[in-house]
Image (tube, rainbow, N blue to C red):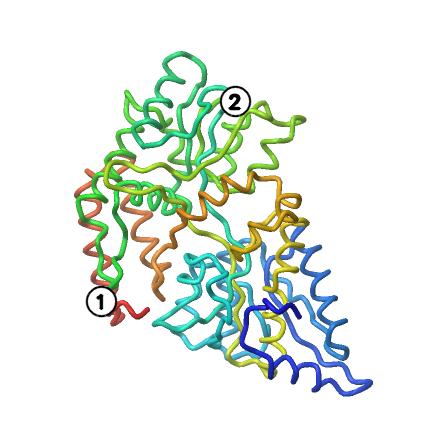
Amino acid sequence: MSAHAGLLLPLLLAAAAACAAPGAEDALTFSGSAVGAEADVIRRQLARFGERYPGVRVELRATPDAADQRRQLYVQWLNARAPEPDVLQLDVIWTAEFAAAGWILPLELADAGDFLPAAVAAARWRGTLYAAPWFVDLGLLYRRTDLAADAPRSLTDLRDAARRAVQTGAARFGLVWQGARYEGLVTVFLEHLGAFGGGILDEDGRVIVDAAPAVQALTFMRDALGPDGFVPPSVLTWQEEQARFAFQNGDAAFMRNWPYAWSLLADARQSRVAGRFAVAPFPPAAGGRPTAALGGAQLAVNAHTADPARALALVAFLTAPEQMLERARLAAQLPARQSLYDDPALADALPLPLDDIRAAMAAARPRPVTPVYSELSEILQVRVHRALTGQEAPAAALADAAAEMRTLLARTGLAGADGSR
């Protein structure tokens, strides 16, 4: 086990090794993403854990590929107090919900400072850490470097460059993003919110999504879709792949998307922009800041596991630097440990430019950390989409959203939290 394994578990690690009697084999279950390259890397690492601790075998529990379906399955298992899976891969927006329900165990990170602060914040509930950051995902602004050599320094620069690309015929669309009524729209809205200095909840858990910066952000998004805008109205039905295809085919000057798109865009066999694109965080407006919505995964231990020592040892093993580096090399996923971004091995492993990724990490921002995030997101999806489709004015849509969110937080006893989430 690496000295930087990250969890305060020396006794537990010793117990995990000592508990396996000669000739016996005890099983743990792990559940998470297991498709394509992710399946290959997790199977490889689970097998290596078994070699490290003879007599311990880890089974990979298959779950649906779709995150919302996986969450529903987890809720069924954990609500029934099932002892398996012992270790679960959680989306960053699930941790508070699972912690508040008593479904996962608290844990400690010995070197929490080595993890991306936004990822650690997303793993806490009421001041206690309940999950270990595993890998991260970041919202990125992609640009055609033949149309914009430098990253836009402000939202005004982005708007002007996008409009110019359309007006000169250099690109069919100025900017494309995910505008369908789903979680992706919330992440796009979050990045616009950050650009104007706004937010959804403040540090004390109070709703601020109807404040002036939020109205400015949503107004900017709506106007970008207008007759003189630079975002095509068709994005209101788009998710990640529709945006990627538009940019990949050379139809868009700019695109907001996730790191997964990089390798596909760089493939000259299928991409018309191969060798002619770069990334940066979404730029700020006056008074705001560059913002990259945080995505990714965390590892948590089932509160009803029959073997918490071994389960915690598995979490420590999988979040050690060497495992994260291997995951970056084999699955092109960004490590959650900041120190790895100074490791030359990571530059060799990842296809993305590390300087640009570091800039995006500095701008990373989690979505609200709350047990009722799914309900808050649904409210925002409906109201933001109504504003973008012209059914409500931005200020009215956000006032309605804020009223619904305050009612939800009051009903669940979460209104006016003291900031100790």
Category of crowding for the residue at label 1, using alpha-carbon neighbours closer than 10 angstroms: few (below 14), some (14–19), many (at least 20): some
Quadrant containing the C terminus is bottom left
Category of crowding for the residue at label 2, using alpha-carbon neighbours closer than 10 angstroms: few (below 14), some (14–19), many (at least 20): some
Viewer-closest of 126 and 409: 126
Q: Is residue 352 left or right of residue 203?
A: right
Q: Mark 2 points at which residue?
A: 250
Identity of the residue furthest to the right in this view = 23
Viewer-closest of 379 and 306: 306
Amino acid beneath label 2:
Gly
Q: In this view, does 270 lie to the left or right of 221?
A: right
Amino acid beneath label 1:
Ala
Residue at 81% x, 86% y is 22
Q: Name the residue under label 1.
A: 415
In this rendering, the count of numbered labels is 2
Q: Is residue 413 left or right of residue 17?
A: left
Number of the label disc, if any, that sits on residue 283: none
Q: Residue 178: x and y, percent?
A: 42, 38
